[in-house]
Amino acid sequence: MPPIHDYVIANQTGANTRSDLNNAFSAIVSNNSSATEPTTTYAYMWWADTGNDLLKQRNAADSAWISILTLSTGAVSSGGATEGTAVLSTGETGGTKYLREDGDGTSSWQSVSSDPAMGGDLTGTASNAQIAANAVGLAEMAGGTDGNLITYDASGDPAYVTTGTSGQILTSGGTGVAPTFQTAAGGGKVLQVVSTTKTDTFTTTTTGSWVDITGLSATITPSSTSSKVLVNINIKGGGVLALNVTEFRLVRGSTVINKGDPAGSRNQGFSGTISSDASDAPSTSTNYLDSPGLATALTYKIQLHSNNTSYINMSSADANNANTVRQTSDITLSEIGA
């Protein structure tokens, strides 16, 4: 292999000068063929880089090598471009073309389409490109304002609904009007319902004091102190035929509510019954809208007062035949939003 030469002929003997010149000529005709780059370089200098199978030329600034072609095939080098990369255009026969690195150490001229087909997330051609179906996800969408909703205006163009405030609801304005967030309508909404139905019987011989009716109570926890509680009560029962009146009252916790005004030594409650038939259990009911002002667990219960034996869900006779019926009593609590 001819030596790489620095192209400087030193002062020396005649024989040495002749040898030095021959080495320089050898380097010239072989384009400085070597696996290692020349130590001394010049602008526009050639180097046949046998280590990388490339013919290279020094750039004008003498600062880097430019790959020109492949030594073994003569294919034009793409300068390190990847497969499929267009590196230049030309007026080749057959119209405008581009030179493509084919990935196998060779390059080839490729025709340039006037309306190329799209690929990837696009369909159609360059003159009529469209986004492919399901190609746009959240990551591809433009950023927006937190809480805004996307809609369409009367012209069918994309628009957005301005963010509302906490507790507001989205309200339609009808055709041609963008929806908006509006404050919800006022109170009166039923927020929750709790109910207890007593299906068994209850009997008490206690007289002169108020007694809890076992199993006829319900507990509710309002979601807000401004909520009200609607109490619905239905009771089947009374006392011994024509001998006593059974009185009823509603208690929240330990507080008597829904009661008549005081009058002398009379009891205060919401109702009273008296049996006109020993085979009959009289019925009474009431509705009461309570304003507890609390957001804790509240227990509502029914108490009775009598001067004789009282019966719930049964008559005082309670004969064991098909003409006698066992009944039910119930209490229902409904939280009403403010």
Image (cartoon, rainbow, N blue to C red):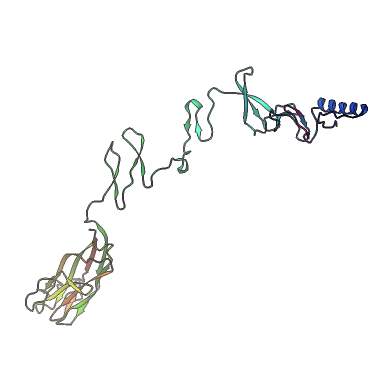
Q: Is residue 71 magenta?
A: no
Q: Position of residue 318 (x, y in %)?
A: 18, 76
Quarter of the image for the N terminus: give it: top right
Magenta residues, start to end:
36-46
Q: Residue at x 18, y 67 (%)?
A: 234
The reply to whether residue 318 is visible in this rendering is: no
Q: Quadrant of residue 102?
A: top right
Magenta portion: prevailing SS class: loop
Q: Position of residue 58 (x, y in %)?
A: 72, 29
Side of 80 where 33 appears, left or right? right
Quarter of the image for the C terminus: give it: bottom left
Side of 165 where 143 appears, left or right? right
Front residue of this view, candidates 260 and 185: 185
The reply to whether residue 186 is visible in this rendering is: yes
Q: Residue at x 30, y 53 (%)?
A: 167
Q: Quadrant of residue 243?
A: bottom left
Q: Position of residue 62 (x, y in %)?
A: 71, 31
Side of 123 where 154 appears, left or right? left
